[in-house]
Image (cartoon, rainbow, N blue to C red):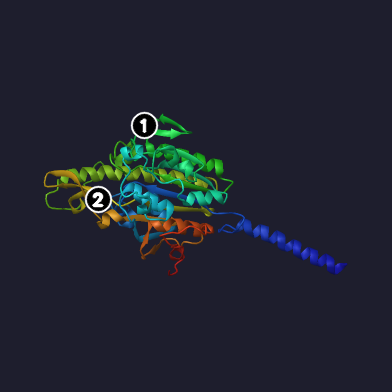
Amino acid sequence: MMKRELIYFYWLTLFFSGVVLAGKGSVPQEAEKWNIISIVTDDQARWSIRAYGNRESHTPHMDRLAREGVRFLNAFVPHPVCSPSRVSFLTGLYSTRFGITDWISPEESEQGLGLPPESVTWPEILKDHGYATALIGKWHLGTLPQYHPTRHGFDHFFGFLEGGNRPMNPTLEVEGEIRQLQGSLPDLLVDDAIRFIDAHKQHPFALLLHFRAPHSPYLPVPEEDEEPFRSLRPTVPIEQGIDLKAIQTWTREYYSSVHSIDRNLGRLLDALERHDLSRKTIVLFTSDHGYMIGHHSLRFKGNAHWVAGGVVGPKRPNMYEESITVPLIIRWPGVARPNSEVLEMVSNIDILPSVLSMLGIEAPEELALDGRDFTPLIRGEKI
């Protein structure tokens, strides 16, 4: 009888020890899944962030993510224009598979171009595994009902379907209705992102926050975002025939728009801290492609315009490094070594397999991907 009681006590002790340890660890256990927040900015160059060497831009919260996580030094996009890049980011496939080879114009949207409903996105896979999913911000992958984000794995959508919007007082879809709201677009998007976190803090969630900024027009932004750059004479590319004053003005305005993102990123990170979610939330920060302001006598991205010799336009397709490189920063508590760097080349077609790997989710067997899992690089391993 004594022996049986001792055995019972032994297993009871192990059980409660396991419960206590699961509550104390910095890395979530199986019963406590990782959350993921994926932040994609629009037209943000890698060179616009202090963590990538800029000494004139103000990006303290992007820099904080880099200090607390891993910074990729050679992250690329296969197509340096908005819609194709977003296809690859969500599906792990080249956009040419879907016939999307340039940004989707309003006319093309009306004619039925968009991300096909039968395509598989990583938020859709996460939803099938019990995640609450949200897209807040820009979509730009079709405006017809069959292309709506809620047809691609998102439970919640707060944002806009087309490529453009106003940086102030934007028109957004809110609970299925189109409304004009008052305020700064980045502020409004993060307001809703925080509401989503508040509502889903007890369960695993995947939040995709797609800013319109710093896409042109860069202004207006709140005074607190523009003020740091009023007296700045920014360092800009010196190319033959460019209008130096115009390039410097655009750069100051661009930095102001970047600052509006960064300030709101701080608000988002504070919300995670407030709910004690930082320890179990992966934060991925990137852009849909790079950007140029005077580089190679061009402005914009892969469909840039001439800005030299008194000529503004027409479009000049390009694959310059400034167009195809993007910032990629991942904070993965307890896994990514703080303030670390990855030199190996990765692409945004690698996002789907990598996100699934980070979350411990198997890709569907029938899913053929162009991208590959780069999570070993985050752990300091080789692929």
Real-space Cα separation, disc 2 to disc 1, in angstroms: 27 Å
Residue 372, which numbered label? none
Residue 292, which numbered label? 2
Residue 291 in view, yes or no: yes
Residue type at the position of mark 1: Asn
Q: In the depicted view, which residue is nearer to us: 92 or 276?
A: 92
- Circle 2 Cα neighbour tier, 10 Å, few/some/many (<14 / 14–19 / ≥20): many
Q: In the depicted view, which residue is nearer to us: 164 or 70?
A: 164
Q: Is 249 left, or right, of 8 in this rendering?
A: left
Q: Quadrant of the C terminus?
A: bottom left
- Circle 1 Cα neighbour tier, 10 Å, few/some/many (<14 / 14–19 / ≥20): some
Q: Position of residue 360 (x, y in %)?
A: 54, 59
Residue located 63% across and 58% down the image: 22
Q: Position of residue 92 (x, y in %)?
A: 42, 56
Q: Is 160 left, or right, of 332 in this rendering?
A: left
| Tally of numbered tags | 2
Q: Secondary structure at mark 2?
A: strand
Quarter residue 361 falls in: bottom right
Residue type at the position of mark 2: Met
In the picture shown, does residue 217 fall above or below 24?
Answer: above
Residue 169, which numbered label? 1
Q: Quadrant of the N terminus?
A: bottom right
Q: Secondary structure at mark 1?
A: loop
Q: Is 86 left, or right, of 237 in this rendering?
A: right
Q: Is 139 left, or right, of 33 in this rendering?
A: left
Q: In the depicted view, which residue is nearer to us: 231 or 309?
A: 309
Residue located 35% across and 51% down the image: 85
